[in-house]
């Protein structure tokens, strides 16, 4: 690191402290050539993750878009805001932990849909209708029919059967 006063490249660290809850380090240094002191800040370089849209455009990853999509889908549904934050954090962690620097918007959309399907079928249909760009009522009907069939199967599996029932 070059001294901002004389341009010297040799210095010593006099004091070092964590700042921003350990996210960065503040160091007081003294130039070995001119003796003047200066401060440097060190922080982890964040990976710049890009989202590849369906049309090929790239834009910076924004976890806020995931949360806003979930909030829109769950508007006026009985879904706690904390649950939406937890889902957002799960998806965010899954995306960030990849080694890739790019993620397809389609992959993010599928992650959101999978979690909404488990959480609330109405929210799932709302999200799916926008995400999959439904063009007519038939597409809604098909999706609702599939969900209705799944719900009937699940409720039958949960009901205890009497010995004489088949």
Image (cartoon, rainbow, N blue to C red):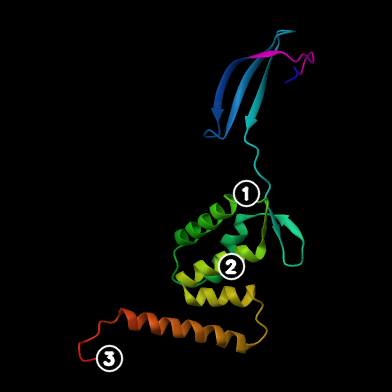
Magenta stretch: give its range: 4-12
**Residue at left offset 66%, top offset 54%:** 61
The residue that mark 2 highlights is 110
Query: Spatial distance from mark 2 to mark 1, Cα to Cα?
Result: 19 Å
Q: In which quarter of the image is the C terminus?
A: bottom left
Q: Which of marks 3 and 1 is nearer the N terminus?
A: 1
**Residue at left offset 45%, top offset 61%:** 83
Mainly helix, strand or loop, the magenta region? Answer: loop
**Residue at left offset 52%, top offset 68%:** 114
The residue that mark 3 highlights is 166
**Residue 80: image x %, image y %?**
44, 64
Tell me the quarter of the picture where residue 149 sits. Answer: bottom left
- In the picture, measured across the screen, residue 24 lies left or right of residue 147, that is right
Q: Return the mark for residue 99.
A: 1
Query: Spatial distance from mark 3 to mark 1, Cα to Cα?
Result: 51 Å
- In the picture, measured across the screen, residue 105 lies left or right of residue 90, that is right
**Residue 38: image x %, image y %?**
68, 18
Q: Nearer the viewer, residue 72 or 18?
A: 18
Q: Could you classify mark 3 by the number of other residues whose Cα lies within 10 Å: few (under 14), some (14-19), or many (20 or more)?
A: few
**Residue 127: image x %, image y %?**
58, 73
Give the vertical position of 58 relative to 30 (above or below): below
Residue 8 within the magenta-colored segment of the rendering: yes
Give the vertical position of 46 relative to 138 (above or below): above
Residue 79 within the magenta-colored segment of the rendering: no
- In the picture, measured across the screen, residue 157 lies left or right of residue 71, that is left
Q: Return the mark for residue 77.
A: none
């Amino acid at each position: 690191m070059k001294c901002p006063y004389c341009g010297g490249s040799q210095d010593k660290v006099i004091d070092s402290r964590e700042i921003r809850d350990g996210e960065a380090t503040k160091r007081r240094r003294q130039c070995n050539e001119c003796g003047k002191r200066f401060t440097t800040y060190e922080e982890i370089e964040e990976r710049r993750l890009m989202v590849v849209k369906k049309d090929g455009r790239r834009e910076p990853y924004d976890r806020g878009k995931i949360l806003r999509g979930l909030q829109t889908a769950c508007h006026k549904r009985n879904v706690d805001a904390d649950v939406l934050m937890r889902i957002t954090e799960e998806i965010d962690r899954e995306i960030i932990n990849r080694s890739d620097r790019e993620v397809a918007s389609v992959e993010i959309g599928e992650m959101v849909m999978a979690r909404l399907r488990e959480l609330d079928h109405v929210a799932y249909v709302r999200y799916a209708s926008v995400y999959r760009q439904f063009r007519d009522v038939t597409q809604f009907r098909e999706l609702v029919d599939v969900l209705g069939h799944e719900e009937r199967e699940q409720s039958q599996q949960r009901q205890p059967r009497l010995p004489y029932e088949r």
